[in-house]
Amino acid sequence: MSDFTSVAVLSWSLGLRRWWLSHGRELITSPFLVQPKAPGRSPTSNFILFSFTDGYSGNLRDPTTFLDVLNIMASIVAPVLFIQCLLSILLTTTLAAPINITRETFRTCRPGNWFGNPSDCCPPKIIKGPIVDFCPQYDATKPLRVRKALQCLSGHELKTYTRKLEKGYALMRALPDSDPRSFKRQNEIHCAYGTGSFIQDGSTNLTIDLTIDVHMNWHFLPWHRMFVYFHEKILQKLLGDPEFSLHFWNFDNSVTATPRHGSHGCYKAGHFVPPMYNEPSKATFEANRSFMAFEPNRPVDIAFDLSQLNPLLGLPIFPNNTVEEQTRMNREIMHRSMITLANTTSFIGKAYRVGDARIVIPSAGSGTIELWPHNTLHAWIGGWMRQPSTAPIDPLFYPFHANMDRLWSVWRKLGYGNDDPTDPDWLDTTFLFWDENAVMRRVKVRDFVDLNALGYTFEEVNDASWIFFDNSTSPGAP
């Protein structure tokens, strides 16, 4: 169907909505609809006694009255539901398509918001130079780079990695703000993509919220994999070291175990904030975090109360769990998020296509992996990490999301029918990122589903600590 027809259908639906807002009150106050009778409500229910606007009143426990109400409601609600369903089918048929970020998307960028907090972080609205399609160019004759678990780095390897990472961030922070590879601009691109600053192309004159957000929908995992990938590439370029890997924070592993025979992985618990990110003298340090994140023997709280993620609520209240209590809760949450609740739809997140309104309630669109441990850990770390407009200001964001990337790959290996979506509207979603040479790249989701093609893998760790958790039915789990 043509774009003109699509816009016409959408405009007609908006017209119907405006009519309802104008005349709905007349319909609601007609003698045909029931309204709550405020005086004399039944003590057993607030919704038992009803009165009609023409003076008739009745008890819904009376079968005759109840049938009368059903007939009245059906005569009005049924046509409305039919029209709503028809509109849904028409809009889905005419507008459904993959999200596509273009030069126009950048040109129409505007200040966004997150839970009412305004943000103004648009990148330059004019993209200079060509936009080059991204194509993985992994050399199959070379071994895969290995992103390692930070808690197992030690000795010379730890010193070398820390020195390189500090140097890379010092060089990145020294870049001018006009350079899209600068540390500041890295934050701004996440902010723009995560606060509704970008608008779906062609929708600027419509009166519904068609802003773009890479959170709370099926774009969360692939977009952040892309973001960390290009961040790592920029560090490699600045360091002059194409083999440099951004190692991950293995926060989900709460148990130290004996390695399996012949294993060369990391089996040490990783649920503490990596020390290199808590030392004030390091370029990886950020002071703006919750006090809990600085306690060296305090395990992370993956079960943290999600309601406290809202910055409007002020400082959160942190439960004072023992290490044993927190370890058990973390293992249970991971088991629930990655296994018990995690089929493809619930794990990846809700579909989000052209014509879909921005999802603003996490529980309405986020996959289980985004809710737990992603959102909970962002809230627990606090500071800049509490909201998408500022989260990458904290260098801890990157090893955190490197592990989120790893967990996606682990989920796919667990079986249980854990397959990525095959919907073209997911695979052909297109984003724009500046690469390590400050060249704008056009990147599709389908190019980022195969880690081997991207040239890296992850060190093996003790995922068995939560995979085989033996009490996942506890009422305290999500």
Image: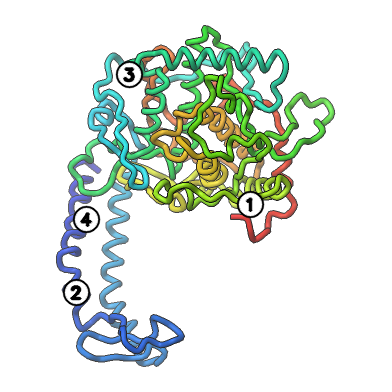
Residue kind at label 1, given as amino acid type: Thr
Residue kind at label 3, given as amino acid type: Ile
- x then y, percent, for residue 214: 41, 38
Point out the image quarter for the N terminus: top left
Asked if residue 311 is positioned above or below residue 430 in the image, the reply reads below
Disc 3 residue crowd, few under 14, some 14–19, many 20+, Cα 10 Å: some
Dot 4: element: helix
- x then y, percent, for residue 203: 23, 40
Dot 2: element: helix
Determine which residue is flagged by label 1.
340
Disc 4 residue crowd, few under 14, some 14–19, many 20+, Cα 10 Å: some
Determine which residue is flagged by label 3.
131
- Between discs 2 and 4, the one toward the N terminus: 4
Is label 3 in contact with label 2 (beta carbons under 8 Å)?
Answer: no
Task: Check residue 450 in the rendering and tell me which mark sits there, or answer none.
Answer: none
Along the viewing direction, whichever of 92 and 170 lies nearer the viewer: 170
Disc 2 residue crowd, few under 14, some 14–19, many 20+, Cα 10 Å: few
Residue kind at label 2, given as amino acid type: Leu
Compared across the picture, whether 186 is left or right of 347 comes to left
Task: Check residue 13 in the rendering and tell me which mark sits there, or answer none.
Answer: 4
